[in-house]
Image (cartoon, rainbow, N blue to C red):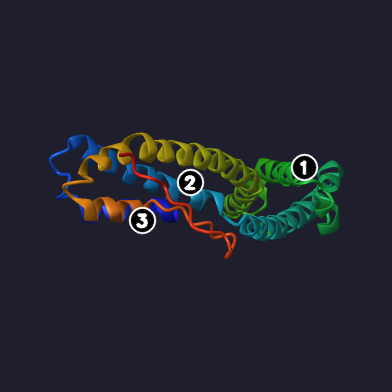
Amino acid sequence: MNMFYSTLKCLEENATVYSAVPALTDAAGELQVNIDALEAATEKQVIDIRGFAKDKGEAEDGMITMTLSVAGAVRAYATVNGDSVLAEKMNVTESKLRKHRDSVVAQHCQAIHGEATVVVASLGTFGVTDAVLLAFQATIDRFVTAIAAPRAAITARKRATAEIRELMKDTTKLLVKRVDALVAQFVLTEPEFVRSYGNARIIVDTGSSSAPATPVPVAA
């Protein structure tokens, strides 16, 4: 990437030198577009997915808290009204919920929400209203979104890696096959530009301090 940046900077600084060569102006514009795309892809590639795990944990905590609150109220209502079936459905604990896989715990909480919705008109005195169930549903929705986010991020990162590979290949081809060849025509009339361009096109191996810079010759 550093070589791409250096090359673009050289071309921008010497734009007036080659302004009469539209093909080179167009190629410089394409280089800018490719660099922008590379930056965008790199940003996706280096995303830290650890934040998604934290968000999922927080979302699960909120959902479970609401589930236990609503289930407790519905169970009390069922007990008062002699509905043993409903009371048993509401017999849920935090440990029971947390032992489930992510998708299963979400389904369990959604089922409790569904049962509460059926009798919500009778739950006002037990502390559960339509507004409470709306807030409960929001916690479920947040958790469902959170459990999908890490997988989506990993998939996006893989796509970004493939995109970077192709963009690097295309950008290198753009420089070697077009820009290098077009800059070469200025070797006699604008030698300083050609020299600066050649220096910008030097590829430096930053992985080893002992490795020499690799010059990229400008076509004569």
**Which element type, helix, strand or loop, lies under badge 2?**
helix
- Disc 3 target residue: 199
- Give amino acid for label 2: Ala
User: Residue 21 or 100: which is nearer the viewer?
Assistant: 21
Say which residue appears at 60% left-offset and 51% top-offset: 142
- Rate crowding at label 2 as few (under 14), some (14 to 19) or many (20 or more) other CA atoms within 10 Å: many
**Which element type, helix, strand or loop, lies under badge 1?**
helix
| Vertical side of 171 occupied by 205: above or below | below
Say which residue appears at 67% left-offset and 56% top-offset: 53
Judged by depth in the image, the label closer to the viewer, 1 or 3, is: 3
Judged by depth in the image, the label closer to the viewer, 1 or 2, is: 2
Whichever of callouts 1 and 2 sits on the residue coming sooner in the sequence is 2
Say which residue appears at 49% left-offset and 52% top-offset: 43
- Rate crowding at label 3 as few (under 14), some (14 to 19) or many (20 or more) other CA atoms within 10 Å: some
User: Residue 115 or 149: which is nearer the viewer?
Assistant: 149
Spot occupied by residue 152 in the image (x, y as percentages of width and height): 60, 43
Whichever of callouts 3 and 2 sits on the residue coming sooner in the sequence is 2
Query: Distance from label 3 to label 2 (Cα)?
Result: 27 Å
- Disc 2 target residue: 41
Spot occupied by residue 172 in the image (x, y as percentages of width and height): 43, 40
Judged by depth in the image, the label closer to the viewer, 3 or 2, is: 3
**Which element type, helix, strand or loop, lies under badge 3?**
helix
Q: On residue 104, which mark appears?
A: 1
Whichever of callouts 1 and 3 sits on the residue coming sooner in the sequence is 1
- Give amino acid for label 3: Asn
User: Residue 139 or 83: which is nearer the viewer?
Assistant: 139
Q: On residue 68, which mark appears?
A: none
